[in-house]
Image (cartoon, rainbow, N blue to C red):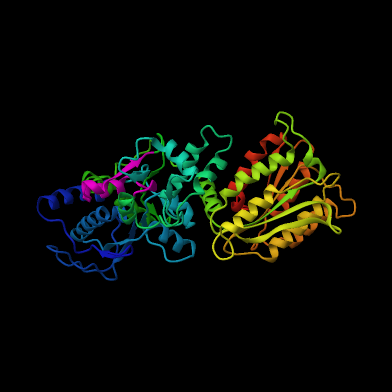
């Protein structure tokens, strides 16, 4: 059955003892907490029930359910339809099974909406952007299942912290479903960020190191992925639900079992809410009626028989802002970047840094860049400039490496080696000034000229000084030009790394603000490595974060 199979349940009826039990449960649900309104219309008869004669068409209640709750919702609706037929109510309920990500995408595009929706997570309600949609009842959740990581049998003993550490070093292939298609990834990202951030000065930088080794091939149907995990001979971890693992292990042979690595207590849980898709009284009433039936003993038995756990309020849903920031971090790290890195090589970069064992500011900047470059995902395009004053004629900047692919056609190991050599060869210009404003404008324009809609285009600029090019443009002119040339449909954010106690942080903040970028300040030059890791970890979500 496909993910959008239509199931007409108006003629399906439980039989025997279970039918009698179900009739009692659903009758209580239909007549207890919910007021049922008699509607005019015609409803076809069901087995053992005389046809109902109405003056018009029947009111059809359309329910869309996530695949995980398909069986439970289908059986529940069959019982509700039987109760309606016996009560001669002109109403019929249908069930459509569809992945929540597809439903949310359709709703965002203004497509048709169901009357009632049972997605796997409340997260989709805000993502769908459907006005009037809201979970119903005091406890809208009908089931739950935690998010975990599936690993080959025998590899779960070390816990999530060890898994994250090994992934950050490239020792584990990490699989995450696309966030637009699965709520599992939101929970996995929060767990990874919380774990990676322990003992780290910046959780985003640590998360960047972990996600830089995400394997894009490990994305697809959970059942197929779990089969691949079971067969894997190398370390691999895939974000899934505990329900998916339980169902896999229940049907798999002993040699095809998988193990789970669970996040710490308080991890992300899919909550399966019942959602009314409008404020209409009849829609809200239908949603409450379905909710009550799914909370009833037989409804819970069906849901738990599908590997789900009872609904829980012990683990509250994280704020949507927190979730969306985690998702943006995922895209910023795994999505290909088109970045121009611009390094200050003015004379002040040759100053020794106190407490750094004789290293200069330039030494620390080179080390930081060498550590941050590996975070660039495959498919990235990178270029490198250096700037001071009058490096090439009257130009304050010099191109060391044009923007181009690090991998694939035109890239590869030679290109990465060329980038590493160019970074290692950066040297301060004795008595060189800082042509900050002219260089910034030229860099933004260069990235704009080759703007790529399939990548995140940005300028990452590191400087320890302030503009002292009297022959160049001033700050007001630069900001006016940046704002005039800014195109929200083709953004080029400037990510500024303010390095050392003499840098002009105020001017760089204004530059970043004008382009939708960000400014990172390291007054102690020894902190440049951490701010560069963070800047690289966030670079591609600008200007949305």
Q: Nearer the viewer, residue 426 or 325?
A: 426
Which residue is painted at 81% across and 47% down in the image? 429
For this view, does 498 lie left or right of residue 538?
right
Which residue is painted at 54% across and 53% down in the image? 377
Check the image and report above or below for 508 versus 196: below
Q: Percent x, y for residue 485?
A: 74, 62
Check the image and report above or below for 315 versus 436: above
Return the residue found at the far right: 471
Number of on-image labels:
0
For this view, does 482 lie left or right of residue 274?
right
Can residue 34 be seen at all in this image of the molecule?
A: no
Q: Report which quarter residue 311 is drawn in.
A: top left
The stretch drawn in magenta includes residue 304: no
Q: Percent x, y for residue 393?
A: 86, 59
Which residue is painted at 53% across and 32% down in the image? 199
Which quadrant holds the N terminus? bottom left
Return the residue found at the far bottom: 56
Magenta region, residue range: 233-262
The stretch drawn in magenta includes residue 256: yes
For this view, does 457 lie left or right of residue 242?
right
């Amino acid at each position: 059955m496909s993910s959008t199979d239509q199931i007409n349940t108006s003629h399906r009826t439980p039989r025997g003892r279970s039918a009698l039990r179900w009739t009692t449960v659903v009758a209580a649900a239909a007549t207890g907490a919910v007021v049922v309104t008699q509607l005019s219309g015609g409803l076809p008869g069901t087995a053992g029930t005389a046809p109902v004669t109405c003056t018009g068409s029947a009111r059809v209640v359309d329910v869309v359910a996530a695949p995980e709750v398909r069986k439970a919702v289908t059986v529940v609706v069959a019982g509700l339809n039987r109760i309606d037929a016996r009560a001669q109510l002109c109403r019929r309920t249908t069930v459509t099974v569809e992945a929540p990500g597809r439903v949310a995408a359709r709703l965002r595009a203004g497509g048709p909406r169901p009357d009632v929706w049972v997605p796997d997570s409340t997260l989709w309600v805000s993502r769908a952007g459907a006005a009037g949609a809201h979970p119903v009842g005091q406890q809208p959740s009908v089931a739950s299942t935690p998010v975990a990581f599936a690993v080959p049998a025998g590899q779960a003993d070390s816990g999530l912290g060890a898994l994250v550490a090994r992934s950050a070093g490239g020792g584990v292939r990490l699989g995450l479903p696309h966030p637009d298609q699965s709520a599992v990834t939101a929970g996995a990202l929060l767990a990874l960020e919380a774990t990676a951030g322990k003992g780290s000065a910046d959780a985003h930088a640590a998360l960047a190191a972990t996600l830089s080794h995400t394997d894009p091939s490990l994305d697809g149907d959970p059942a197929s992925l779990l089969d691949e995990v079971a067969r894997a001979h190398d370390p691999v971890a895939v974000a899934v639900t505990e329900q998916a693992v339980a169902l896999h292990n229940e049907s798999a042979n002993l040699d095809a079992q998988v193990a789970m690595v669970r996040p710490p207590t308080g991890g992300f849980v899919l909550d399966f809410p019942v959602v009314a898709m409008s404020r209409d009284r009849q829609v809200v009433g239908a949603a409450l009626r379905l909710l009550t039936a799914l909370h009833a003993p037989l409804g819970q038995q069906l849901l738990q028989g599908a590997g789900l756990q009872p609904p829980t309020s012990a683990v509250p849903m994280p704020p949507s802002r927190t979730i969306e920031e985690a998702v943006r971090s995922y895209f910023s790290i795994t999505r290909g970047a088109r970045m121009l890195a611009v390094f200050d090589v003015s004379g002040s970069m040759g100053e020794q840094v106190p407490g750094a064992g004789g290293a200069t500011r330039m030494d620390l900047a080179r080390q930081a860049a060498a550590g941050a470059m590996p975070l660039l995902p495959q498919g990235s395009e990178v270029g490198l400039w250096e700037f001071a004053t009058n490096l090439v004629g009257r130009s304050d900047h010099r191109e060391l490496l044009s923007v181009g692919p690090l991998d694939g056609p035109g890239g590869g190991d030679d290109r990465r080696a060329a980038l590493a050599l160019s970074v290692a060869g950066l040297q301060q210009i004795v008595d060189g000034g800082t042509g900050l404003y002219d260089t910034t404008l030229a860099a933004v324009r260069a990235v704009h000229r080759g703007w790529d809609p399939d990548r995140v285009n940005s300028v990452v600029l590191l400087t320890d000084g302030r503009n002292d090019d009297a022959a160049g443009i001033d700050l007001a002119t630069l900001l006016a030009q940046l704002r005039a040339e800014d195109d929200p449909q083709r953004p080029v954010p400037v990510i500024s790394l303010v390095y050392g106690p003499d840098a002009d942080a105020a001017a760089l903040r204004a530059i970043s603000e004008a382009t939708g970028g960000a400014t990172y300040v390291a007054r102690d030059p020894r902190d440049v490595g951490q701010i560069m890791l963070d800047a690289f970890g966030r670079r591609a979500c600008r200007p949305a974060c």
